[in-house]
Amino acid sequence: MLSFDHDSLHAGVVDPEMGSMRVLSETALRFPDSLSFSSGAPYDGNHDLADLSRHVERYIEHLRAKGLPEERVTRLLFQYGPVNGLIRDEVALMLKQDEDIDVPPEAVMITHGFQEAALVALRGLITSADDVLLSVSPAYVGIRGAARMLDVPVHGILEGPDGLDPEAVAEAARRVRSEGRRAVALYLVPDFSNPSGTVVPLAARRRLLEVAAEEDLVILEDNPYGLFAAEGAALPTLKSLDTDRRVVYLGSFAKSTFPGARLGYLVADQEVIDSEGSTRTLAESLSPAKAMFTVGSSTLSQAVVGGILVENGYDLRSATRELAAIYQERLRAALDALSEHFPDGGDHGVTWNTPSGGFFLVLKVPFVADLAAMERSARDHGVSWAPMSMFHLDDDGGRREIRIGFSNLAPDAIREGIARLAGFIEKTPHDTPEERS
Ligand SMILES: Cc1ncc(COP(=O)(O)O)c(C=O)c1O
């Protein structure tokens, strides 16, 4: 009988880091009475099954109103569709409306979530073993995993309280070059990063674009949380400031509509010139990668999301105001509960950042907060969370830090969860100052 040595399989499936998110959700499942701060799942209190068919119907009507004959509409929904997607026009309208990103539909590729957009972008841009992806560290597991699956080396750049420092990016690009390798692209989440909740300030966004031009980098901008800023506080995306077409924008509908749709988009308006001198957009040129990863995105999912876009006049920012208020309330509940349990001047040794939006915040604690500690917390204190070390790209980062994901718990549950967490922290022996240094 054919059998395999586990370690003989590709590093992408063998590496325990790639399974760490699964370990987190399994721990949460093993302790069903525990409250979970470990996921970034969106609020799901407003879903209604009847909406699914209504949205599909809305999209079908939209196609008919465009003058498409019935036979064509039927074929679009049932057949293999265009590889780069059915709803590119609608997404281009949404990008203009929501983000002031002005691109033609040909610059948009509809993808199987952010995840496929990242895989497609990396597959197209990284062409040799000496090519390197620069990435903010700590980073979303999805980008690290996508790079691992494609054997793309990643060089982490430690972020500060204001996210990535552009000068650190320039220095990293030069360091990679001095090693005889090529820094090709830079990945970051400028708005309410996962896992840290940081926001890159406007001046640093402008400087990042300059650095990208100076160091010849493509910026991969991932922006699933930008809609969830406090009222009036949203900053322009890098892509909307990008006059030099340095940015490939990786979007997701997971948080702005619903994650089960598994829909996202890649925006790449760069010109690609072939040997005959004809030009296409980068999004069109990357099409073979999408064709070979997923053939095309589900027409049904596209019809649902297309219907949502049409119904809301391509304005998801307005359509998600209530949702944004729910996340803001949850963020405040978490911050207030932390202040109550860990008052200023106490000897608890706990500090945290205060993001202005998004789904996550980070707590510094006076002991090593690894998966074993998380399991003790879930088992003995009924609260789970994510060790920040899971997201750091170097071996040592985030060892005494906890990611709190507050998006999927009601304010009362957040207050109860923070109270339980305070109990766990109080019962856990603190490291000595020497151990911490
Ligand atoms: C930073 C970041 N990017 C993208 C996504 C969404 O990815 P997808 O569209 O593949 O669900 C998430 C969701 O957790 C995220 O945190």
Image (spheres, rainbow, N blue to C red):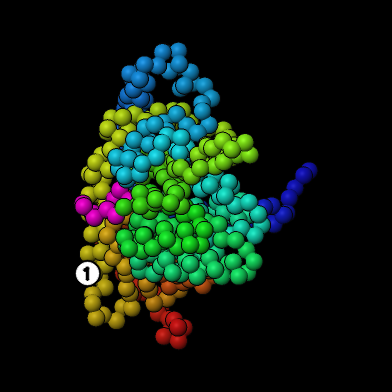
Using the image, determine if residue 29 lies above or below residue 79. below
Q: Regarding mark 1 in the picture, which secondary structure is present there?
A: helix
Q: Nearer the viewer, residue 250 or 281?
A: 281
Query: What residue is drawn where x is 22% and y is 64%?
Result: 336
Residue 16 rendering spot, x and y as whole percentages: 58, 59
Q: Which of the 4 quarters of the picture holds residue 33?
A: bottom left
Q: Is residue 281 visible?
A: yes
Q: Is residue 393 visible?
A: no
Q: Nearer the viewer, residue 117 or 276?
A: 276
Residue type, label 1: Glu
Residue 407 rendering spot, x and y as whole percentages: 32, 52
Query: What segment is highlighted magenta in the picture?
Result: 226-235
| Residue under pointer 1 | 340
Q: Label 1 neighbourhood size at 10 Å, few (<14), some (14-19), many (20+)?
A: few
Q: Which of the 4 quarters of the picture holds residue 289?
A: top right
Q: Is residue 192 left or right of residue 126?
A: left
Query: What residue is drawn where x is 40% and y is 79%?
Result: 430
Q: Is residue 72 left or right of residue 151?
A: left
Q: Nearer the viewer, residue 18 or 311?
A: 311
Using the image, determine if residue 320 lies above or below residue 429. above
User: Furthest residue to the right?
Assistant: 1
Using the image, determine if residue 304 lies above or below residue 433. above
Classify the position of the N terminus by image quarter.
top right
Q: Which of the 4 quarters of the picture holds residue 349?
A: bottom left
Query: What residue is drawn where x is 51% and y is 42%?
Result: 271
Q: Is residue 252 magenta?
A: no
